[in-house]
Image: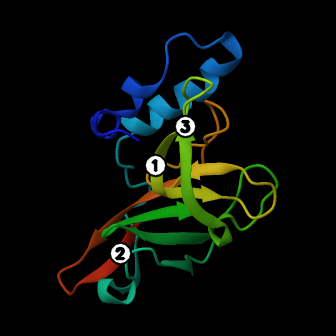
Amino acid sequence: MSDKASQKSLSELIPTSYGQEDLTICKAFKYVESAQPPKSRTGQRLVVCHRDELKPGDRRIVDDGKQGIGVFNIGGQFYAIKNVCPHEGAQLCRGTIHATHAPSNVTEFIPALHGRVLRCPWHGWEFDIPSGKGLYDRHGRVAVYKVEIDESGNVVIVL
């Protein structure tokens, strides 16, 4: 990818000449780019581990008593996502983490979302870890949770 392309936002890289069938995936990428941090649902806090125990690229799956939640360190930032794929109920957070390609012209491949795309281990559905947005259509998503570092350096999920 050229230096110019690496400096552009995802929405600037997406071609405007896409047909109707491709607009859905373009909207999914635009949503990922504009997603806001999640809001607390209950205010409960779940301590996961000390931040030094979760190195960049690592994940930890925890249980809050009702469901599993995966906590990921992506480049020093912590994110939490529900450990259930909305498609068939697979343990989503056991899937692979990688990048994907942004929608582009037929002869172009534009790498995007490096190290933050979680692929379901059963059927390959892809989700952006920070936003929970499914990359397969504009409506698909999985719940995400706010993550904080407390005064002791612990990674804490705010439920």
Residue 154 point in image, percent of width and height: 29, 83
Q: Position of residue 138 (x, y in %)?
A: 60, 30
Residue placed under numbered mark 1 in the picture: 113
Q: Earlier in the sequence, mark 2 or mark 3?
A: 3
Give residue 42's position: percent from left, percent from top. 43, 59
Any mark on residue 109, and which? 3
Quadrant (top left/top right/bottom left/bottom right) for the N terminus = top left
Can see residue 159?
no
Residue 156: give its label.
2
SS of the residue at dot 3? loop
Dot 2: element? strand
In-image side of 9 versus 128 (left or right): left
Label 3 crowd (10 A; few <14 / some 14-19 / many >=20): few
Horizontal placement of 84 versus 4: left or right? right
49 is higher (above) or lower (below) than 129: below
Residue at left offset 46%, top offset 49%: 113
Towards the viewer: 42 or 89: 89
